[in-house]
Image (spheres, grey):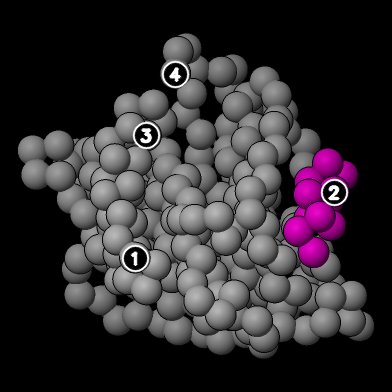
Amino acid sequence: MCTLTVVPLPGGRVRVGFNRDERRDRPAALPPRRWRAGRRVAVLPIDPPSGGTWLAVTDAGLLLALLNVTPPGPAPPPAAGRSRGEVIPALLGSDSLADALAAVERVVDYLTFAPFRLVLVGSGVAADLRWDGSRAMVTSRLVGSGPLLYTSSGLGDHLVEGVRRGLFEDAFAGPADGWAAAQDEFHRQTLPGREHLGVNMTRADAHTVSHAVVLLGPDGAELTYHPDAPDRPAGPVTLTLPFAPVGAA
C-alpha cells in the first residue's frame, strides 16, 4: 500500500516522491538515519517491526524503493513469514543498479516473501522488479522519458491503478518546469467520498502515514522525510548524502 513517483528535472536531476500507506495498528517508523553496508553508506528510514525499510538512497547514486503487490484473484499461498522490509537492506552494498539486480538473484529467496515490487533508480534508468508470488519480472525504463508512477493497495492494486493513474496524468499534463510542484500536489491528493482510492489515502484500517522526497543530483542526494500524511503538519527531517565514485573503497 504505497504510491511512488519518479520525475526527471532539468540538469539531469531526478526527484522521487513516496507516500507510505500502512495499517493503523503498525508502529510509527523511525526517522531517516545513515546506514553502512560494507563500503557503501545509505540514508533510510527504519520500520521498527522488521528493522528494515521501504526506501533508501546510497552513495553509489542508487535509490531503492519497495511497494507491496496485491494481485487480483485469490491470494497466493502465504510466504514463510519474512518481512519485505528485509529486501532493501540486503542490497545496500551494491555499486550500481545492475549490481543490485544481480544481488537480488543471489540473496533474495522470493518464495520466503509475500509479493512485492522493487524499484531501483540510478544512472538515468528506473528498473522495476515485480514478484507476484509465482514469478519475478524486471522492466527497465529511461528516467528522462517522463514521470513514472508505481502504486499499490491492500484492497487490490487493480482497484487503485486506474484512478491514481488518471490523477497522475492530469497532474503532469503541464510543462516540465512545473513538475516538481505538480509532484507535491499529486501526493497530497485525496478523493472525498472515495478516500480509500486517493493518493493520500485513508480508510478504517489503514492510511497514509508518511511522505518522503528524494532529490538525486549529479553529485549527491537529499532525502526529506515528513512523518505524517503530506497534507498534515509535521516536522520534516532532511539528510544529505554525497555520492562516492562507484566501486570506490
Rendered location of residue 50, percent (x, y): 57, 53
In the image, which residues are magenta?
Answer: 96-107
Upstream in sequence: badge 1 or badge 4 = 4
Extreme residue in the front direction = 175
Q: Amino acid at mark 2?
A: Ala
Q: Which residue is mark 3?
A: 161
Q: Which residue is mark 2?
A: 102
Instruction: For the N terminus, give its image quadrant.
Output: top left
- Residue at x-position 14% and y-position 37%: 194
Report if the CB atoms under discs 2 and 4 are less than 8 Å apart. Answer: no
Upstream in sequence: badge 3 or badge 1 = 3
Q: Nearer the viewer, mark 2 or mark 1?
A: 1
Q: Amino acid at mark 4?
A: Pro
Q: Amino acid at mark 1?
A: Pro
Rendered location of residue 26, percent (x, y): 38, 51
Rendered location of residue 62, percent (x, y): 69, 67
Upstream in sequence: badge 2 or badge 4 = 4
- Residue at x-position 56% and y-position 75%: 13
Q: Is residue 99 above or below residue 77?
A: below
Residue 31's tag is none
User: Which sits in the foreground, 111 or 134?
Assistant: 134
Rendered location of residue 248, percent (x, y): 89, 81
Q: Is residue 220 above or below residue 48?
A: below
Residue 102 is one of the magenta-drawn residues: yes
Asked where in the image residue 110 lies, by quadrant, the reply is top right
Q: Which residue is mark 1?
A: 175
